[in-house]
Amino acid sequence: MIWYIGRRLLQMIPVFLGATLLIYLLAFYAGGDPIQAIMGDKPLSPAVQEQLRAQYNLDKPVLVQWLIFIGNVVTGNLGVGFNGRPIVDQILAAFPVTIKLAIIAVIVETVLGITAGVLAGLKKGSIYDTGLLLVSLIVIAVPTFVIGFVAQFFLGVKFQIFPVNVGRDPSWFNLLLPGFVLGIVSFAYVLRLTRTSVAEVATADHVRTATAKGLSRGGVTMKHILRNSLIPVVTYIGADLGALMGGAIVTENIFNIRGIGSLLYDAIQKSESPMIVAIVTIMVMIFLVANLVVDLLYAALDPRIRYAK
Amino acid sequence: MAISRRSLMFTTALAGTSAVALAACGTDSGSGGSSDGGGSAGGSGEAVFANTTEPENPLIPTHTSEVGGGRIINAIFAGLVYYTADGKVENDVAESIESEDKQTWTVKLKADQKFSDGTPVTAKSFVDAWNFGANTANAQKGQSFFEPIEGFDVVSAKTATADQTLSGLTVVDDSTFTVKLVSAQSDFPQRLGYSAYSPLPESAIGDIETFGESPVGNGPYTLESWTHDSEIVLVPNEEYAGPRAAKNSGLTFTIYADNDTMYNDLLSGSVDVIDAIPGSSLQTFEDELGERAVNAPGAVFQSFTIPQSDPNFSGEAGKLRRQALSRAINRKEICDQLFFGTRTPATDFVAPVIPGGGATDIPGGEVLQFDEAKAKELWAQAEAIAPFSGEFTLSYNADGPHKDWVEAVCNSLANVLGITATPQPFPAFGAFREQITGRQLKGAFRSGWQADYPSAYNFLAPLYSTAAADGNGSNDGDYKNPEFDALLAEGQSAPDQDAAIEKYKAAEAVLMADLPAIPLWYQNSIGGYSDLVSDVEFGWDTVPLYYAITK
């Protein structure tokens, strides 16, 4: 187990290097000249341009820029962003907000999704089941930004239950609606996966045996049905974290949340490579760690699974 | 073991959810705007809430070239002059700005002007600030504003050292300094209301980095706090005694990343004044806001430029072809149908809020009128001289709101002239500009201009003069016409503004014949305000006059 974790963590180093290089190249070749983006319609004199280029290392070849970036990551100092503020400070300011948002979204997704899925799966074909399936179908069919704007308009503007704009004060309560919007699509998928899985396991032999032995209904559901149905769901949630981070860009913009998503969006607009690469790399790392956790959860869920050394 | 752990997890998580739901019930009565806080300024009433974007740079006047930071700079600094809503120039810190020959200007300051930290505003405050902004060693984005001053070529050279200064600036005494320009420029005083010409206190020059985060100014407001990406709080400056004194108890700028959020905040009463309307609400905002909607022509001019080097558009045939294109665009229809009347069809090259702008009497100005028959006729004449080769493309950056109108213009051209007109998107503004400044872009490209100061000259010289061509300015099409240059120079040495405007109009007539860029429309000032505030007026530069707002 320790060996397994150690090996997986070591594997992240080449992934980290590869991901940063790839993103660096993408940002470099797709974004155009950052100095042009900084200038806007009004040109700067060639002398000032040169000064700025040297300041941000833009005068060096792309591979050298990447190596400087890697060096900066090691020392923990990513330098100053195009707006004159340290990149690390900007990321540290934005991160807690997005983490809060993600926690709300994951709770919506897992707790609500699995609970609703189990209930639907156990009462397959009931009105309750059909109703949930219909709701999930609608949620999956409607794009997140539409759900976001509709929720914002009715709950924020019309009934004024939630704030329209979270930027000034990203408290747990204020982030509730955006977190819900962010998690709602995944909620629908988790619900459907759990439902199918539970419905299938519920008719399995070992469940019938457990019931015949006289175990309580709750005990059977928790120990024999849910545990065995969770593997596909957990796999999905691990993979879904990536989509969640992408979705954060949209959700954060709708509710004016100044988190990682909007920071990344701004950086892409400005072709600010160090910022883009730093944020995407952090996302890649979170994704890798989350999937390691998912892999470890497999063993907890199914004792038959063992990890090779 | 496993089962209990998991059920425990379930119950706590569910309990957590219900607790949050309870909290939701508990606070919903207070979330209507009072929960925003921030309005802690002294004086009567609450601060005015307004929108902005995160300043792209530290708050240094000479380093701020975009609206998000510009509106803050304008509130916390006072320059020599300021602009009224209709673009008139009035003295702010200056007592007088005079010149005999329009080349050497003598500036006298009002007595007893102070920065918010109590230090006096002297002639040196201006001269030092300008020297700082002009010097390449400081890499300031507003550097080019000091170009007209003598000695700029020295301090702007690549080899300039930080201690070099503009030879044209001379401090006479504490309240007087002189400015010698490289040539006669009658509109020089008009420029001085731009934020780059603000004075800096002595403490700034020594430690500009600290200053950029917590600037000390001499304007109607002082910076109370700047929470990055979130909000900027300004309170009235007690030391300010000028004509722009704050009529409210403070300004709280909320930083928005998205215009839809901003508009919804206005509807829900969490923001008082906004100076943009999201595309999705352009059609409805005037109905929804009623009298509180703002929609008036602003100082933004939009066009598309066809490079002079384009073989299809040079020579006699090219001239005819440019006219044919201009005649084939139904500007009014696009402004009404696509922008719902939030843009105004162009009748000249200068925005209508500028003195002398929006003129309808420019000789040759009829070329901007939609006329299908005439367009076809002109195109046929051009074809007779030299046939068109290749296809017509109109390039734009797809990360801005340009796709719709570019397609509409291309359709208009294709339908009327029977040619293939193709929109050509670039993914990012940076990549788009790189092609243009590298002169690699083939065909036409979108162009636009937002004035820095309210003068017709500012709409003409930077965009079409020979001096601004070949990468030395914003003349991206490399248009060169000595007649045009001469008329501009005559305007610059004219004795008064009316005489200058006559010359500029004559210069515009030259442009009407040559059409280095095809004028499309002027962008309106659009925005709105809540019923809590009054006296909301938008300036010529499409930014509200915040100091005059009462709440």
Image (cartoon, coloured by chain):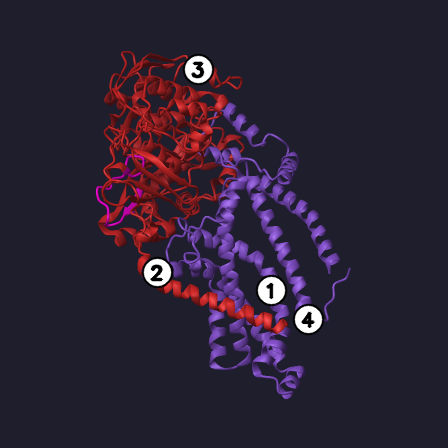
Q: Nearer the viewer, residue A286 or B67?
A: A286
Dots 3 and 1: beta carbons under 8 Å?
Answer: no
Q: Which chain does the purple colour mark? A: A
Where is mark 1, residue-wise? A236
Identity, as a three-letter code, of the amino acid under mark 1: Tyr
> In this picture, is B6 found above or below A216?
above
Residue at image mark 4: A302
- Residue at disc 3, secondary structure: loop
Q: Which mark is residue B27?
A: 2
Callout 3, which amino acid? Thr
Q: Earlier in the sequence, mark 4 or mark 1?
A: 1
Q: Nearer the viewer, mark 4 or mark 1?
A: 4
Element at label 4 = loop
Q: Residues within 10 Å of mark 4 (few under 14, many from 20)?
A: few
Residue B165 circle label: 3
* Rendered location of residue B29, percent (x, y): 31, 60
Whether the magenta-drawn stretch holds residue A1 is answered as no
Which numbered mark, 4 or 3, is in the foreground of this view? Answer: 4
Q: Colour of chain B?
A: red
Q: CA distance from mark 3 to mark 1?
A: 64 Å
Query: Which contiguous range is marked in magenta?
Result: B525-546
